[in-house]
Image (cartoon, helix red, strand yellow):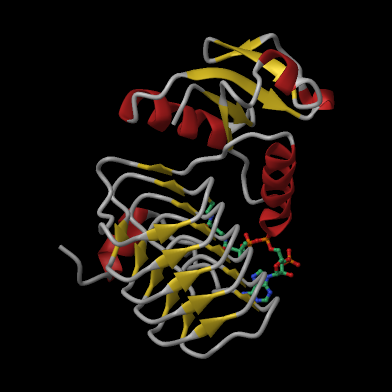
């Protein structure tokens, strides 16, 4: 990666900035965002410039660009800004954390973000703009489509095919050999054991909160 311009001013951009600079040794030259969201001159020690004019100060032949946005609109915003960055002529390389468990044969597209302690098995293909947060697992011979978002501890078993723009919440689990369509939302702690067509939503109920204090609960519990 050359010196890079990060698209985004939010928490995702802060995390990406940390990993790129501290873990990856990349210099973040500037931040950019849609002009109406430019609300400061600098962020994390780098200047902030509107996306409409970014190429004048940080030309694509000298700087790369990385889109570091969240999963708004089921990842559609990230996808759109990535396409626009490319149209401006930027290279949009991926970042793989040096301490992630990624095999040598991993195939991945551009603008992917693979965090620390991700586990990816051999024969895996990721599309472009796939974000995989620490602790997630992608099993062997699985394919994940463009713009997907895997939150920490999402687990995709082996030989799974995932379409575009899907969201996998914390601990979302997908069984082996399944096919997940485009734009599916798999909420936290879900277990998917059947193929999903496009645009399906899978959610799990939150755990019950008892109307007991810890002391009251421990009195009636066999714990301790
Ligand atoms: C699916 C999820 C969003 C539901 O959590 P929640 O706190 O109930 O969410 P919301 O209040 O936004 O729910 C929105 C609507 O979804 C529907 N819904 C939520 N859970 C439902 C369930 N078990 N069954 C049916 N509908 C449900 C309801 O219509 C709800 O609205 P309501 O207020 O009328 O109940 C949550 O379980 C989840 O997966 N969050 C993702 C966490 C995560 O991994 N974050 C990572 C960020 S990096």
Quadrant for ligand 1 reads bottom right
Look at the image and tell me in which quarter the C terminus lies.
bottom left
Q: Is residue 132 left or right of residue 220?
A: right
Look at the image and tell me in which quarter the N terminus lies.
top left
- In terms of depth relative to the viewer, which is nearer, 123 or 167? 123
Q: Is residue 122 above or below residue 18?
A: below
- Residue 138: image x %, image y %? 36, 67
- Residue 53: image x %, image y %? 79, 20
Q: Is residue 203 left or right of residue 190?
A: right
Single out the residue that lies furthest toward the right: 36
**Residue depicted at 63% across the width and 51% down the height:** 71
- In terms of depth relative to the viewer, which is nearer, 61 or 35? 61
Q: Quadrant of residue 101?
A: bottom left
Q: Is residue 147 left or right of residue 16?
A: right
**Residue depicted at 50% across the width and 65% down the height:** 188
- Residue 18: image x %, image y %? 42, 27
- In terms of depth relative to the viewer, which is nearer, 210 or 83? 83
**Residue depicted at 72% across the width and 17% down the height:** 49
Q: Is residue 114 left or right of residue 103?
A: right
Single out the residue that lies furthest toward the left: 224
- Residue 178: image x %, image y %? 47, 86
């Amino acid at each position: 990666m050359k010196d890079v311009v990060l698209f985004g001013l939010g928490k995702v951009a802060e995390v990406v900035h940390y990993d790129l600079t501290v873990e990856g040794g990349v210099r973040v030259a500037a931040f950019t965002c849609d002009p109406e969201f430019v609300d400061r001159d600098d962020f994390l020690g780098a200047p902030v410039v509107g996306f409409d004019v970014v190429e004048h100060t940080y030309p694509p032949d000298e700087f790369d660009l990385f889109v570091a946005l969240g999963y708004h609109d089921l990842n559609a915003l990230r996808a759109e800004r990535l396409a626009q960055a490319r149209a401006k002529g930027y290279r949009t390389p991926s970042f793989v954390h040096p301490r992630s468990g990624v095999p040598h044969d991993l195939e991945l597209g551009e603008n992917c973000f693979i965090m620390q302690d991700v586990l990816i098995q051999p024969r895996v293909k990721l599309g472009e703009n796939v974000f995989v947060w620490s602790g997630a697992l992608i099993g062997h011979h699985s394919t994940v489509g463009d713009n997907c978002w895997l939150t920490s501890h999402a687990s995709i078993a082996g030989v799974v095919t995932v379409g575009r723009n899907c969201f996998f919440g914390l601990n979302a689990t997908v069984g082996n050999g399944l096919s997940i369509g485009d734009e599916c939302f798999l909420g936290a702690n879900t277990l998917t054991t059947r193929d999903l067509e496009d645009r399906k939503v899978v959610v799990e109920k939150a755990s019950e909160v008892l109307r007991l204090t810890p002391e009251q609960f421990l009195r009636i519990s066999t714990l301790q």
